[in-house]
Amino acid sequence: MSHLNREILKTATKPKLVQPTFLQKVELVVSQIPAGKVMTYGQVAQCIGQGTARLVGMALSSLPKGSSVPWHRVVNTKGGISPRANPQSSLKQIQRLLDEGIQFNYNQELDLKSYRFKP
DNA sequence: GTTGTGACATGCA
DNA sequence: ATGCATGCCACAA
């Protein structure tokens, strides 16, 4: 077999292992959160078994605008809405959570003890 | 191959 | 309790 054929065979036989990106894993987990429940960034990272809370936030921020992923069900470890570049986004998140029946206390934080979703 | 960038989570004062 | 410094690491440039 020629050298060229060997090279061709190598690339043809060995399918590129397209492992899911971190973002895709995040989407997968977040999509499991039922309405009226929330998960923390760290919880999502731990659930994936990869990355950190910060990265989860980064991933969510990169979601396309009309994504069906319920990104609003992810909050920080205090049960609060993390500040971000676009405050509109935070407002929309609070609005959606309220719509799902989640209540916020005087600190604009929700009670994780009652709303936390544990897979 | 390197580097800069954050929707966070802790620990410590 | 409450604020600040530090570690974190996938991804795009």
Image (spheres, coloured by chain):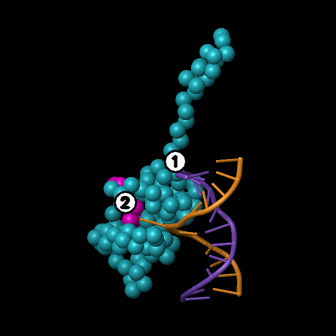
Chain colours: A cyan, B orange, C purple
Residue of label 1: A21
Q: Nearer the viewer, residue A106 or A61?
A: A61
Host chain of mark 1: A
- Which label is found at residue A94? none
Q: Residue at x 59, y 19 (%)?
A: A9
**Start and end of the magenta stretch?**
A67-73
- Quadrant in the picture for residue B3: bottom right
Q: Which residue is mark 2?
A: A70
Disc 2 chain ID:
A
Q: Residue at x 45, y 70 (%)?
A: A85
Q: Residue furthest left?
A: A99
Q: Tell whether A3 sits left or right of A87.
A: right
Q: Would you identify the image quadrant in which residue B13 lies?
A: bottom right
What is the CA distance from the residue labelled 2 to the residue labelled 1? 18 Å
Residue A70 counted in the magenta span:
yes
Residue type, label 1: Thr
- Residue at 42%, 84% (x, y): give it: A107
Dot 2 and dot 1 within a common chain: yes
